[in-house]
Image (tube, rainbow, N blue to C red):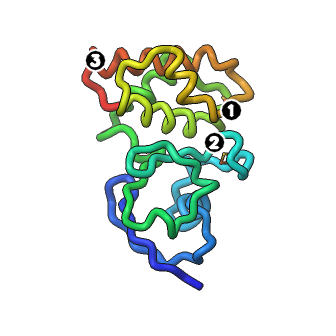
Amino acid sequence: MATLVELTLNGRKRVDAVPGNRLLLDYLRESAGLTGTKTGCDGGECGACTVLVDGKPTLSCLTLAAGVSGKHIETIEGLGAGGTLSAVQRGFHEKLGSQCGYCTPGFIMASAGLLRTRPKPSEAEIRAALGSNICRCTGYVKIIEAVQFASELITSEGLAP
Ligand code: FES
Ligand code: FES
């Protein structure tokens, strides 16, 4: 049975009729056409599908679309404004935090969620915040450096996380 979902997606209000069992991940990719959010394990283990729900990093593969009605959803497509990269996007770009890139949207959204609440996190806090995200390529060191650089950019250039 279809359920009416009303939400704000990357700043824009949407209303969609979706099956009650439709995952947020599938809603984003197939209904909203936002394919930046990736399907990895499809079982809550890899973090590739991470989006922000009311600012909180959330695994969209474990979340029903109907369950986020009335909430604000942010995906990788919603970061940056007017063609300007966000602090975390700049960090990953300049510190080479991405290789194949498949995990990157999930890491960036999890990092953005962290830096909004902790603009100057310690390395241990960064590692803890990204502990549910898996990367097969980078060895994680560059990812940590990317988030640390993003934290500096928030202060030095006033960029949004
Ligand atoms: S696809 Fe959601 S945690 Fe892996
Ligand atoms: S950059 Fe390839 S999986 Fe992370």
Q: Which residue is mark 3?
A: 155
- Label 1 CB sits under 8 Å from any ligand 2 atom: yes
Q: Which residue is mark 2?
A: 48
Residue 92 image point, x, y percent: 51, 24
The image quadrant of residue 101 is top right
- Badge 2, how many Cα within 10 Å: few under 14, some, many 20+? many
Tell me the kind of residue under disc 2.
Ala
Tell me the kind of residue under disc 3.
Thr
N-terminal label among 1 and 2: 2
* Tag shown at residue 134: 1
The residue closer to the viewer here, 81 or 24, is: 24
SS under mark 2: loop
Circles 1 and 2, Cβ within 8 Å, touching? The answer is yes
Residue 99 image point, x, y percent: 65, 25
Residue 120 image point, x, y percent: 37, 18
- Badge 3, how many Cα within 10 Å: few under 14, some, many 20+? few
